[in-house]
Image (cartoon, rainbow, N blue to C red):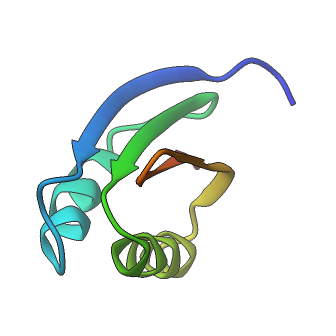
């Protein structure tokens, strides 16, 4: 995998339900080829929602890690 440039980092640990998806959807449209968005989520249910949303929109999750209680996703076009 070539080096991805982090276009934006979104800390969405304080929001749940539709909040993170609403914030993410606007930013997803801004990224170009070779760029990624780093998303930090506070719970597993929100992570699953975001993963489903990202796939449905045709984007890719290239990395998914857990950092303490938080989940970190790297999303690209």
Q: Quadrant of residue 31?
A: top left
* Residue closest to the eye, 47 or 74: 47
Q: Answer with left or right where residue 65 lies relative to residue 3.
A: left
Q: Is residue 43 above or below residue 65?
A: below
Please provide percent x and percent y for residue 27: 27, 46
Q: Quadrant of residue 10?
A: top left
Residue at the spot x=82%, y=22% of the render?
Answer: 2
Numbered-mark total: 0
Residue at the spot x=52%, y=35% of the render?
Answer: 36
Please provide percent x and percent y for residue 45: 38, 81
Q: Answer with left or right where residue 16 lies relative to residue 57.
A: left
Q: Is residue 43 above or below residue 49?
A: above
Residue at the spot x=37%, y=46% of the render?
Answer: 40
Q: Is residue 36 above or below residue 68?
A: above
Please provide percent x and percent y for residue 25: 27, 61
Please provide percent x and percent y for residue 58: 57, 70
Residue at the spot x=87%, y=30% of the render?
Answer: 1
Report the residue that reaches farthest toward the right.
1
* Residue closest to the eye, 51 or 59: 51
């Amino acid at each position: 995998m070539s080096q991805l440039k982090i276009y934006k980092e979104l800390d969405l640990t304080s929001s749940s339900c539709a909040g993170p998806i609403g914030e993410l959807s606007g930013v997803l449209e801004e990224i170009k080829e070779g760029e990624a968005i780093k998303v930090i989520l506070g719970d597993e249910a929100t992570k699953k929602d975001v993963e489903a949303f990202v796939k449905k929109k045709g984007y890719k999750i290239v990395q998914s890690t857990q950092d303490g209680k938080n989940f970190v996703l790297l999303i690209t076009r």
